[in-house]
Image (cartoon, rainbow, N blue to C red):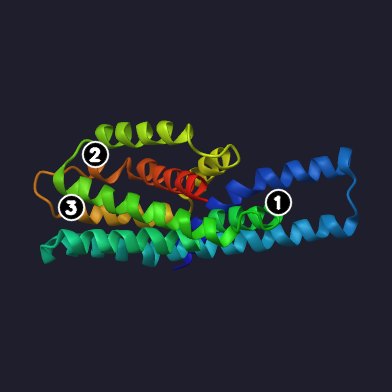
Amino acid sequence: MLPLIKEKFLEVSKAITPLIVIVCILQWTLVKAPTALFIQFLIGSFMTTVGMMLFLMGIDTGILPMGRTIGAELPKKGSLLLIMAVAFSFGFATTVAEPDVLVLSKQIDLIAQGAILGNTVLYVIAIGVGISVAIAMLRVVFGIRMAYLLTAAYAIILILSFFTPAEFVPLAYDAGSVTTGALTAPVVIALALGLSSVLAGRSAVSDGFGLLGFASIGPIIAVMILGILR
């Protein structure tokens, strides 16, 4: 356990230290923010470092192995419906808990002031990711080329862009960018790698990757449809 703690601490420290250094330089040279606020920033940075370290440790020790195991067991049940249901559930549940998505939904509540409900957008995004992940798992099962799925999905996005209200178009693209974060990405990849590992003639590289790009398309389409129907 100690080697893992050290490894994750170094990873997080390398990621966060440049930000801390830049803020400190700006504080001492240009910004001159109140001392109390600067101390809050340092405390928050320390808490972020510890939190991310524990988060990444949890992913490596629990979420990734379980995701691969579940993905490997699903084909043995011989049910495409079960595979789609599990994939949708994973996509939906991880998106609802995704920190980036939660931040976006809170910003929507703050800026829109009730015109658009953040919780509504949150669950619409989660549904979009769930559907995309379910389709992506079927793509692994049937060996469909990712290029075909991406072409069809982006064609749908382009068409919907002409009918979506202007205020929903940028929101839709932001929704797609925040879904493949630190929680959703490892779960989806682990599930796909586990699924492809037990299918004959499948490559973990070609089947396990590219799914995140496709998963991010679902919320874009879902939010655009929400804007059209609203």
Q: Secondary structure at mark 1?
A: helix
24 to 117, vertically: above or below: above
User: Which numbered disc flags the more N-terminal residue, 3 or 2?
Assistant: 3
Q: Which residue is mark 1?
A: 111
Q: Position of residue 35 (x, y in %)?
A: 89, 56
Q: Position of residue 112 (x, y in %)?
A: 68, 52
- Give the residue displayed 59% in from the left and 58% down from the top: 118
Name the foreground residue: 127 vs 87. 127
> 95 and 196: which one is in front?
95
Dot 1 amino acid type: Ile
Q: Could you tell me how far apart the alpha carbons at marks 3 and 2 are, in whole angstroms?
A: 12 Å
Q: Which mark is residue 197?
A: 3
Residue 34 screen position, x and y as percent: 90, 54
Q: Residue at x 42, y 31 (%)?
A: 158
| Quarter of image, res 89 | bottom left
- Which of the 4 quarters of the picture holds residue 119? bottom right
Q: Quick check: marks 3 and 2 in contact, CB under 8 Å?
A: no
Residue occupied by mark 2: 206
Q: Earlier in the sequence, mark 2 or mark 1?
A: 1
Viewer-nearest residue: 9 or 95: 95
Amino acid type at circle 3 is: Ser
What numbered label is drawn on residue 159? none
- Between the residue at mark 1 and the residue at mark 3, the CA separation in whole angstroms equals 45 Å
Residue at 48% in and 31% down: 162
Residue 33 can be seen, yes or no: yes
The image position of residue 135, as x and y in percent, is 27, 49
SS at circle 2? helix
